[in-house]
Image (cartoon, grey):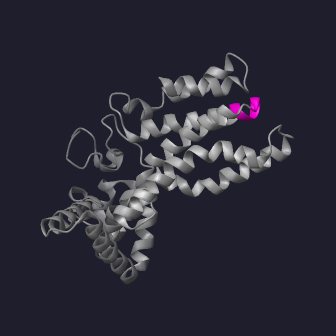
Amino acid sequence: ITALIVLWMLARSYVPFPYSLVPSLLLSVSWFIALDVTKLSTELLSLLLLLLFVYWFEMFFLSSRPWRALAAGVALSLFLLIKPAALYVIPLVIILIVLRCHKEHFGISWAKTLVFFFIVPAIIIGAWSARSIILFYTWQIQSGAFVLGYRGVEATRPWDRVAAAFIAGLTGDIVADKFLPGYAHDPEPYPSIDETTDRFVWLGHQGLSEAEREQIVYAEASRNIRANPLKFLVLGITGLFRQNTPMNHEGIPVTHAFVEGEFDRLSEAQKI
């Protein structure tokens, strides 16, 4: 609900009523948003924080009140803690601030604007990065060992399974099963995720710390990827398909639809 209100407040700054209600209306009827309203997911929370960031960012440039830049910085900081990959967008944000300050003859210099905007992220993100350096020997906010680990395991699969995963990402598991019988009941990346999870658990039972386990999995993933660069590339594209797969009403990717034999009244062609 808060996200809908923030989006409306942002829209009304540029679009007259009642058209300013349209963005919030479209968001409220979005299938993927509706799926998350009964649970607190990182996706829904990050959406709210991103909207708050954009809203306060715009309000700052409309009013030149420094506290609004600080508020935008707080929202951005919390968003980055949830979605660390967005750190790579920071240079773009800096460029946008400099360009807008110059283009709009803004009352506050771009240098002061950057200070107001980044003072909170520098403290929050900097402190979290310091923690990562101390505990995990990396400046990254969030470890990528598990994801890179299972992606590396995926790259070691036979080419027929890699090709089936690619086809499944485009057309669904039911189609991929035609090319590799049995694939639909054991699709990627789940076997690779399970294997990587078991690896982490086994290393933990050997008395290794979390940092030591991550270093081992990073090294193993690096070797797997270097040994199978083309498979890793193909599976990277497949991963983009998976990340943008629509969900059914239970929040499960539709990629896996119809493979369990349900809806017998439909022909296989209709299911595909």
Q: Is residue 240 left or right of residue 259?
A: right
Tell me residue 98's x, y (percent): 77, 50
99 and 221: which one is in front? Answer: 99
Q: Which residue is drawn at 65% across and 43% down?
A: 117
Can I make out residue 165 in this image?
no
Q: Residue at x 83, y 39 (%)?
A: 106
Q: Compared to 53, does 125 lie above or below?
A: below
Q: Which residue lies furthest to the left in this view?
A: 205
Q: Is residue 82 left or right of residue 63?
A: left
Q: Compared to 193, does 47 lie above or below?
A: above
162 and 37: which one is in front? Answer: 37
Q: Which residue lies furthest to the top in this view?
A: 18
163 and 139: which one is in front? Answer: 139
Q: Is residue 230 left or right of residue 215?
A: right
121 and 214: which one is in front? Answer: 121
Q: Residue at x 37, y 41 (%)?
A: 247
Can I make out residue 17 in this image?
yes
Which residues lie in the magenta part? Answer: 59-64
Magenta-span inclusion, residue 196: no
Q: Which residue is drawn at 45% across and 48% down?
A: 81
